[in-house]
Image: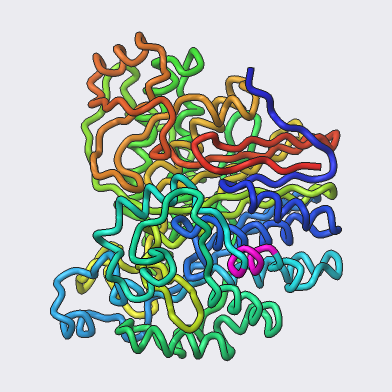
Amino acid sequence: MLHTPRSLRGMVTSPHHLASQAGLDVLKDGGTAIEAAVATAAALAVVYPHMTGIGGDGFWLVLWPDGRTASIDACGAAAARADLSFYQGTGVSTIPWRGPLAANTVAGTVSGWDLALSWSHAMQPGLGLHRLLRDAIYYAEQGVPMTEGGAEITRAKIGELGNIPGFREVFLPDGQVPNAGYILHNQSLAQSFRRLATDGLDSFYRGALARDMVADLRALGSPLDLADLNAHRALSRPPLHVDIDGARLFNMAPPTQGVASLMILALFDRLRAGQLDGFDHVHGLVEATKQAFRYRDAHVGDPAFMTVGAQDVLDDAAGLDSMALAIDPAVAAPWPHPSQAGDTVWLGAVDADGVAVSMIQSVYFEYGSGVVLPRTGVMWQNRGSSFRLATDGWNALRPGRKPFHTLNPAAARFADGRTMVYGTMGGEGQPQTQAAVFSRYARYGVPLQQAVTAPRWLLGRTWGEDSVTLKYEDRFDPDMIAQMAAAGHVLERMPPFTSVMGHAGALVQHPSGLIEGATDPRSDGAVAAW
């Protein structure tokens, strides 16, 4: 039997056990869930570097005990020099996935920490940055064991990353891919965290640290300049929401795909799906995913360039009804469709006062652009490699434009008073895994850890995968799989547990104060509680 961890005073879940523990220790020291999330995120940037780092972007949902829900958009925009003429001058026809030309957007993650902490400090004085960044500094300076997943990804991507500036020095000791258990160090990153603790998080954008990072970026050939970092601010924005039977769901507004995550569950809520993990359940969610992804790929991007508001679509009950009616309960709709990729970490934290955090941060592909800045040890994202070198249209490159993001932290408030935060890494798989975990827990009453551990599916592509089949872990009922094939789904069997399906987690706080948590056995994570 799978046991769901429970506690009363606070809980953190993340895809690496050391990071979860770093967050829990902050709660034990009197910190808020927001402060615990920052400590966890900072530690993840060191102990899980193939998935995240401070050179990437981040998004937050914060659920307050008085019923308010707020979000933070910490997504960086394209550099002022990142235009068609810049790339034409480099001789490329598309933005490269790796290297300095891929490092063309501001890294917003640290600005999100800063804004979230200002909210926390409005509640109570809070812990200092030296305390919150303590474990990240320790692991960067004293070392952290390479995970199995990190070693595997490094080995698989060495052809793309081995010659990227700075990568070899940090992640390829003696020029070789380290095995699991090898002790990785990043002394320069440790010093950067110390500088952030001393000078403040804003120094990442408007301080000596910013100047050092930009000097390296410019020397390596990135279009980013100091003015781009100076101009960046994290934004507090209303989260998207949609009501389903018994709950109100929340997610991030564009440029993320949060609207697609909400649409999937809103459409599924309109279907009369039967047995847990049976044909109606899985087929219904897969077909709802197709509907949501078609909308997403046609309309979602930088909100400044969208013609229809994402919340307006979610508020259009008649429109959602029509989309649900378009789902054939017995036959798979045609697929494939253009897909997205990405590498990410999701983390959640809940404190005894009832503040709940759903937070996600990413460098996009595994190890991002691969560029590790020599003066600071910061690995820069490649989120801007998703821009199209086109004069107009969806996700076309323009200075100051925000790229489309697969990142989307999720949350729910139930009519019975429960609060839930949940999420996952996994590009295309994020909305699908969210739907699997939430529907199992909320609609079918499955215990939280079982809802995360149970077999999952993935339509399309996620990190490390190019195929667009309907992949499934080989733990489902064979009769259900046969029904899916007969309905026209193009299936691809995967191992019983695979990271292709993402690294999910969830926390639920009950009106009694009881907190439940779950972590993903596909990750190196843990639930840390007290």
The image shows residue 65 at horizontal and vertical percentages of 79, 49
Magenta-highlighted residues: 135-141
> Is residue 385 in sight in this rendering?
yes
The image shows residue 177 at horizontal and vertical percentages of 36, 57
Q: Give the vertical position of 34 relative to 376 (above or below).
A: above
Q: Nearer the viewer, residue 292 or 347?
A: 347
The image shows residue 64 at horizontal and vertical percentages of 75, 53
Residue at horizontal 27 percent and vertical 20 percent from the top: 331
Residue 137 inside the magenta-drawn segment: yes
The image shows residue 258 at horizontal and vertical percentages of 48, 50
Q: Nearer the viewer, residue 271 or 423?
A: 423
Image position of 53 (left or right of 387): right
Image position of 482 (left or right of 181): left
Residue at horizontal 63 percent and vertical 41 percent from the top: 526
Residue at horizontal 68 percent and vertical 61 percent from the top: 39
Residue 145 inside the magenta-drawn segment: no
State the quadrant of the N terminus. top right
State the quadrant of the C terminus. top right
> Is residue 383 in sight in this rendering?
no
Name the residue furthest top. Answer: 479
Based on the displayed image, in which of its 4 quarters is residue 2 positioned?
top right
Image position of 343 (left or right of 203): left
How many tags in the picture? 0
Name the residue furthest front. Answer: 174
Which secondary structure dominates the residues rendered in magenta? helix
Colouring convention used in this rendered image of the protein: rainbow
Residue at horizontal 67 percent and vertical 40 percent from the top: 527
Q: Give the vertical position of 243 relative to 395 (above or below).
A: above
Image position of 316 (left or right of 287): right
Q: Nearer the viewer, residue 150 or 520?
A: 150
